[in-house]
Each structure stands twice: as C-alpha cells, then as structure tokens.
Amino acid sequence: MSQGRGSASTAMVIAIILPCLLIHTVPSHGATYTVGGPGGWTFNLSNWPKGKSFNAGDVLVFNYDPSYHNVVAVDRGGYSKCTTPASAKVYTTGKDQIRLVRGQNYFICNFSGHCESGMKIAINAV
Ligand SMILES: *[C@@H]1O[C@H](CO)[C@@H](O)[C@H](O)[C@H]1NC(C)=O
Ligand SMILES: *[C@@H]1O[C@H](CO)[C@@H](O)[C@H](O)[C@H]1NC(C)=O
Ligand SMILES: [Cu+2]
C-alpha cells in the first residue's frame, strides 16, 4: 500500500518535473537579436556585432522605416565596397527577420550613401 502511494507520488513528481526539463533541453531555435537595439537598423552600426557571439540559426530583426532604408544581403565585396551584387536578396518590409547561416553574413542598406555611413554589418555565425 505504502509502496503504491510512493510510486504514485514519484510518478506525479516526474509528471511535473519532466516537462520543465524538456523545455530546457530541447534544442532551441536560436537567439533573436534586434539589430541596433532600440534605435533599430540605422547609420553607424558597423561596430554593433562586436562583442556578441552569433550561432547559425540565430535570427536578426531589422526594424526601420522602409521609405528610407532597406536590408540587402551581400557578399564580402558588397560589404566592403558598398555595392549590391546582382544576386543579392533585398528586404523591404521594415521589420525583416533574417536567419543567420553558418559563416560570414553581410548586410547593408543600399540607399545611396547609407552603407558608406556605416549602415552595414558583418557577422560570423559559428
Ligand atoms: C558612431 O558610433 C560610435 C559609438 O558606437 C560613436 O562614438 C560615433 O560618434 C558615432 N559616429 C557617428 C558619425 O555617428
Ligand atoms: C538596391 O539594390 C537592388 C538590387 O540590385 C536594386 O534593384 C535597387 O535599385 C537598389 N536600391 C537602391 C535604393 O539603390
Ligand atoms: Cu539606409
């Protein structure tokens, strides 16, 4: 009898604890970063990634006014020269969510002069 009660309460404890453990052990879908923090996607952000560590699968949120800015995924040359390769993907919603791929990820705003004013980020996702 007491044996039965014991295992019943053990089962109850497991029923309560197990879901909590699972929440913490199931692989997460990655962190979410708001580029530029509360100020959003704007000028002078090329240092924003410094000191942060990014994993493949993390999501970058770009908040901006789409009348004045956009987000263009470019390659290394596009990032350093502020040019837009023909194959570049252009995002224009003003609240774009972009998942990082492993390796280097480069984003610029290709409105005239903006990338040159530091509206660009380079991120290495491991
Ligand atoms: C860019 O940001 C840095 C700090 O992140 C600041 O010291 C600098 O004055 C800013 N430059 C411009 C042009 O806003
Ligand atoms: C940004 O790049 C795209 C793709 O090459 C181009 O169509 C668009 O005109 C550019 N936008 C601006 C504002 O220069
Ligand atoms: Cu811009």
Image (cartoon, rainbow, N blue to C red):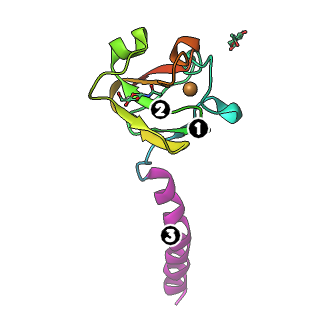
Residue type, mark 2 in image: Val
Residue type, mark 3 in image: Ile
Q: Position of residue 20 (x, y in %)?
A: 54, 61
Q: Position of residue 54 (x, y in %)?
A: 47, 29
Label 3 – label 1 distance at C-alpha: 54 Å
Q: Residue at x 55, y 31 (%)?
A: 69
N-terminal of the pair, mark 2 or mark 3, is 3
N-terminal of the pair, mark 3 or mark 1, is 3
Image quadrant in which you'd find residue 47: top right
Q: Which residue is mark 3?
A: 14
Q: Are marks 1 and 2 in contact (CB under 8 Å)?
A: no
User: Does any portion of residue 126 appear in the rendered image?
Assistant: no
Label 1 – label 2 distance at C-alpha: 12 Å
Q: Which residue is mark 1?
A: 67
Q: Position of residue 83 (x, y in %)?
A: 38, 16
Closest to the observer, 14 or 38: 38
Q: Quadrant of ligand 3?
A: top right
Q: Position of residue 14 (x, y in %)?
A: 50, 69
| Label 3 SS | helix
Residue type, mark 1 in image: Ser
Q: Residue furthest bottom?
A: 1
- Please state the extent of the stretch shown in magenta in the rendering: 1-25
In this rendering, the answer to whether 35 lies above or below 14 is above
- Look at the image and tell me in which quarter the C terminus lies: top left
In this rendering, the answer to whether 101 lies above or below 116 is below
Q: Which residue is mark 2?
A: 71
Circle nearer the viewer, 1 or 2? 1
Residue count near mark 2 (Cα–Cα under 10 Å), binned few <14, some 14–19, many ≥20: many
